[in-house]
Amino acid sequence: MKVRGTKLTSDEFHNKVIAVKHAPEIEYDWATGVAISKFLKGLKDGKIIGVYCDSCDRTVTPPRMFCEECFSPMSKYVDLPDTGIINTFSIAYIKTDASRVEKPQLPAVIDIDGTSISPSGFLHLLDEINPDDIKIGMKVKAVWKDAIDRTGAITDIKYFKKMEDA
Amino acid sequence: MTKKVGMVSVGLTQFQRRAKETGKELAYYSAKMALDEAGITRKDVDGVIIGSAPDAFDGVHQKHEYLTDGSGGFNLPTMRGYVGGGTGVFSPIQGWYSIASGVNDVVLVTTEEKMSSVQPSSQAAFLTIFDNMIERPLGPNLVWIFALEMRRYMEKHGIPKEHIASVSVKNKGNAIDHPSAMLGKKWTLDEVLNSELLADPVRLLDISPVADGAVSFVMMSEEKIKEFGISKDDVAWVDGVGWNVDTTMWTNRDLYYPKYVEKAAKQAYNMAGMKDHSPEALRKWLTFAEPYDPFNYKELHHLEGLQLFGKGKAPKAAFEGVTARDGDFPVTPSGGLLGVGNPIAAAAGMKSAELYLQLTGKAGKRQIDGRDMERGVAQAWGDLMQVGTVLVMKGGRIE
């Protein structure tokens, strides 16, 4: 079987062939919607917000305007504790742009307490912990920015840290 | 009553890190090769399917319009399907239903990806698949979510890393015999286990390389296959198709098991008349499998979703050689994404093509020998860890 295609080395691609370059400058402002705007407002106030579905009898976070299971509207927003358990985690030496870092970032899925399915939570970061000591199932607590610095963003929580006496 | 549909040829380009050709030119190479292999011309084609993943990689908006000419779709009913990494199996599924429904009789399907255009790496484009409001501000990398899923899977079943790493050794080794391969090489288990740590537990050799490439198929109704006088030795029949998508809220489901792959697989098996979904029965019914392997653990994860091994059972089987090309149940004889390369939509297109090539005895040095090539399954996965696409085909020779 004969297959076609012409290979370029990195040097050829970047320095030898004629390439047309383009760096688009595009900005977006996303209205955060009915449910996530409540979640982000909650973060600004130092709280984690969830939502309760009457017909499925379950509490989940991040909140949504409708239940993806039973397709009923969801409007009972509830305050959840700012604690949870580590559902899974990584010790990451690779950043968004694929560049490498010496001090690892510690992404984790945090299963937030007070929810009724497992997991129910969100992606965040861990800190104040030796990476070698992180375990799935470990109890963690949110570390918040000072109230004055909070803007209604997921980064209003700086990171999660291991709970003392857990 | 749906029409019976057969795949009668495939075409592939070389997979490579940087192709000189544009995406449209790559699509032309594979589409032209598929037509030539089938012994037909574009005039015989009455429908075209294009599969390509995010426009962000090419920086070309509405990529299907751009790719139309290269895919042979000029002035024909042409449609693009797109479910992220799941696309390369979804595209032949679309080819199947455009024929099975009676809308078309001869369909040219092309899957294409050109990932080298985005600078400095494709990671910047991958960022756009994360939730725009509560995930992107954290600065994620695509490797993160694989690391999170891999750890969850390993923790749930107590899987040793050696078992997972053995998949990289097997697939990259199998790829030596694939003419499109960019990374075919015999690595040792220690080399995989000690390669650069990117996001623990993911290391460099656990991952497939980004690539440029295209893969095409010609699919026809049974009537047209007879009309063109195509030998049944050159046909692989579509036996079952399935696809399924889970919620995009991936932090609200347990990543250790791909339920959506199970649902897609059962849809395909049921359509093919296979009601016994036990691993033993399915491994007897199917001769081999081409599950999606962008990362080594994903092949194992998907084998379990496909019901070919019990939950947590695939890693040990792989480590013990059960899934080697000459093992009891060959898995990824092509060399997979890990070895041949991962031009997203075309990567799973290559897996679908491997079903055809193995079932018709045209896989060359990769041909699984010593057994009747009755039936194979290809599976792909994509979107934000949430879609499963499954294609079961059987050889024309067992009719």
Image (cartoon, coloured by chain):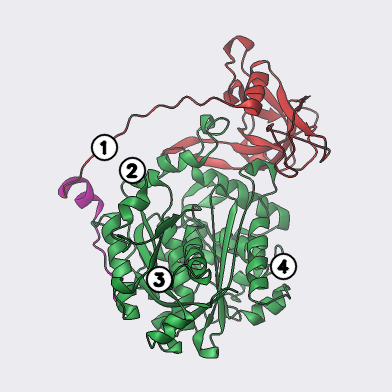
Chain colours: A red, B green
Query: What stretch of residues is rendered in magenta?
Result: A1-16
| Label 3 with label 2: CB-CB less than 8 Å | no
| Label 1 with label 4: CB-CB less than 8 Å | no
| Same chain for the residues under marks 1 and 4 in the image | no
Mark earlier in primary sequence (4, 3) = 3
Q: Amino acid at mark 1?
A: His
In space, the residues marked 4 and 3 are separated at their CA atoms by 33 Å
Q: Nearer the viewer, residue B51 or A124?
A: B51
Q: Residue B187's x, y, as percent?
A: 45, 66
Quadrant in which the N terminus of chain B appears = bottom right
Q: Which mark is residue B139?
A: none
Which residue has dot 1 on it?
A22
Q: Amino acid at mark 4?
A: Gly
Q: Residue A89's x, y, as percent?
A: 63, 42
Which residue has dot 4 on it?
B310
Please state which of the two labelled residues, at mark 1 or mark 4, is closer to the viewer.
1
| Label 2 with label 1: CB-CB less than 8 Å | yes
In space, the residues marked 1 and 4 are separated at their CA atoms by 49 Å
In space, the residues marked 3 and 1 are separated at their CA atoms by 33 Å
Q: Residue furthest top?
A: A148
| Same chain for the residues under marks 4 and 3 in the image | yes
Q: Nearer the viewer, residue B170 or B21?
A: B21
| Label 3 with label 1: CB-CB less than 8 Å | no
- Please, what secondary structure does the residue beneath circle 4 have? loop
Taking the spot 68% from the left edge, 77% from the top edge, the residue there is B274
Residue B282 visible in this rendered orientation of the protein: yes
Which residue has dot 3 on it?
B217
Question: Which picture quadrant has residue A69?
Answer: top right
- Please, what secondary structure does the residue beneath circle 2 have? loop
